[in-house]
Amino acid sequence: MLAQTNIDSLLKIITLNKKDSGQVRALNALSLEYARTDVNKAKEYLYAAFSLASSLILYESLSASYSQMVNIQMITGKPDSALYYLDLLKQLSSKHPASIIQANYYFTAGLFYKVQGNYKGSLPYAKEALRMYTVMNDKTQMAGQNLNIGNSYLNMSDIKSALPYHLEALRLFEEINNKRGQSFCLQGIGTDFIELGQYKSALPYIQRAINIKKELNDKRGITTSLMALGQIYDGLGDYDKALSYEKEALLAQQELKLTSEEAKTNFNIGKIYVNKKDAENAAEYFNKSKTLALQVKDSSLAASADAELTVLQVNIHKLKATEEKFFSSLKIAEERGDNNAKTNMYQFLSNFYAANKQYDKALEYNEKYHSAEDSTHNNELQGYVKKLEQQYNLEKKEKEIALLKKDQQISQESLQRQKIFQYSAYIILFLLMLTGFFIINGYRSVHRAKRKVELEQMRNNIARNLHDDIGSTLTSINILSKVALQQIGYDIAAIASIQKIKDRSSAIMESMNDIVWAINPANDALDKIILRMKEFGSETLEQSGMHFTFMQEGELNNVKLSLMQRNDLYLIFKEALNNAIKHSKASEVNITLKREPGNLILKITDDGKGFDSQQQLPGNGLKNMHNRMRNMNASFQMLSAPGSGTTVYLNVPLP
């Protein structure tokens, strides 16, 4: 999976143990990955990041570590520990005003208060962080802060404010191709529609979000999508399906120790049981939600759960509800900006006063309830949200069309540039030959005196190779270029001719590569030659559909060949394999390199169609192989018969 690939690459950096800024960044990144799947591992990497960043005085990286630890402590139900690290981050940021460190503090403080349910308190921090990241043009952080602000407005039931932030976050995450961020935004937009009561519109967004999270193995993110699916099917009246999604999310959150999210899921399950008229189960889950909410210091959620329990107790035991409890919950909801909880309190108070025959107050809070409901679900707002969604999709399509037009323009310009290619080919070839000359000349100037004779021979050999390989190819290029000049335009023939120029240029580069490799004294050892033989065999034979084996026999590690010998040995081997590919129609080629006392033997056998070895074969390949054999003072033999394959023997004497 994508996430696992990222973890593997980060672990490789950690293993190097360079104790530098790169290792600190890798530790923070690993913590961020594991925060979605294994919070204990995430903490281990953060502790290591704290230590290394402090010793290296890397304050920006240290601020990122503190920020992540605050978030982990909050979601695992340890708000006091979270506050401790938030204070450390605040102290660090005070020493670095108007910096990324201070921006990290505002971002983290916003998240801290949001997780506690204090949405109104989180907004100023989140908006200041967005302002600072915008000045820095940090698009990743800008996207993240737009998402956080949108989520805070969403939790306050202010969908009109939430959706523009969610759409802007999605646009930025798509621009930087951040899949995880896109999944968060799709989740947020889907939840906007859930809050509006448009459950069918919400469903495709949540499904797209959960698909991306599964692709990234984002276990924590998957739980939030499951919670949203539960809310959707609760709204659609399919309570059993809603319970199955919420309970699946709850099990995963318990496994991941996500206490804060576990509290919310218990509350959701309680609400579903209320809708199912199952007061006993509803009370059980509201009690669990209240306990966990108090643990993470989410007073808004705790108050909402407590209010729900009060209503259940009244209904079950016919007890009188206490007015103070509802007003206490209402006050907390208003202080923290939890408009959803506030709306519920209005409804509870209206019912309370009606039960106590205080109809004037019942009417007052009933009107407040419906006013709050209308502010979320009125037709004007729903139309506004739909318009925003359509506008975003339209802009996205327009950008895609613009990119297509740009691609077409680039294609046309590319065809025109091909006219220039034929001229640049001459220049490239000249530079290649000039580069080859400088390499050879430099090699000669620094080598020891005892290799001068060999270098003179090598120069002659290079000249022959340049003449045979590059000279004939240059002639082909010249002819093809003239044809291209006559045919240039937009027809296929001209394009094909120019493509051949490219192919011939590639052949020249391959030949030059062989020459430069042969000159390098670092390749004197036989094991380097064997490695190059295997690479060439793998690249050529397997691509041609032939299976090949390469066997080594005898002690080959200490064999050293002269400059001429290793060059000729490799080129004979290469020519033999090229002949097999071109002419043999073989399915298998077996190669053996063997050391015997005083000799090095190369044997190449194929199971192809063979030929009459007594006949004179056309071409210069076999002639060149014989010439190279004589240069090496080696014996060479080629055995073949029609239908019996071909075997090439080369016996090189060793000193």
Image (cartoon, rainbow, N blue to C red):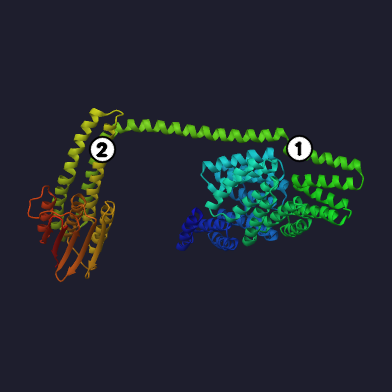
Give the farthest residue toward the bottom. Answer: 597
Residue 154, how many percent across, how many down? 68, 44
Instruction: Between residue 130 and residue 373, name the one nearer to us.
Output: 373
Residue 214, how many percent across, how many down? 55, 52
Give the farthest residue toward the right. Answer: 357
Q: Give the residue number, with chain letter if any, for mark 2.
A: 425
Give the mark nearest the N terminus, 1 or 2: 1
Label 2 sits on what residue type? Ala
Residue 578, how many percent across, how many down? 20, 52
**Is any atom of residue 613 visible in this view?**
yes
Q: Residue at x 89, y 53 (%)?
A: 320
Label 1 sits on what residue type? Asp
Residue 243 in which image quadrant = bottom right
Tell me: residue 10, above or below residue 426: below
Find numbered disc 1 in the image and state the secondary structure of the residue it sits on.
Answer: helix
Q: Residue at x 14, y 51 (%)?
A: 461
Quadrant placement of the C terminus = bottom left
Q: Are marks 1 and 2 in contact (CB under 8 Å)?
A: no
Q: Give the residue number, with chain letter if any, for mark 1.
A: 374
Q: Residue at x 83, y 39 (%)?
A: 367
Residue 218 in which image quadrant = bottom right
Find numbered disc 2 in the image and state the secondary structure of the residue it sits on.
Answer: helix
Q: Is residue 514 left or right of residue 169?
A: left
Q: CA distance from mark 1 to mark 2?
A: 72 Å
Residue 550, how many percent across, how many down? 25, 62
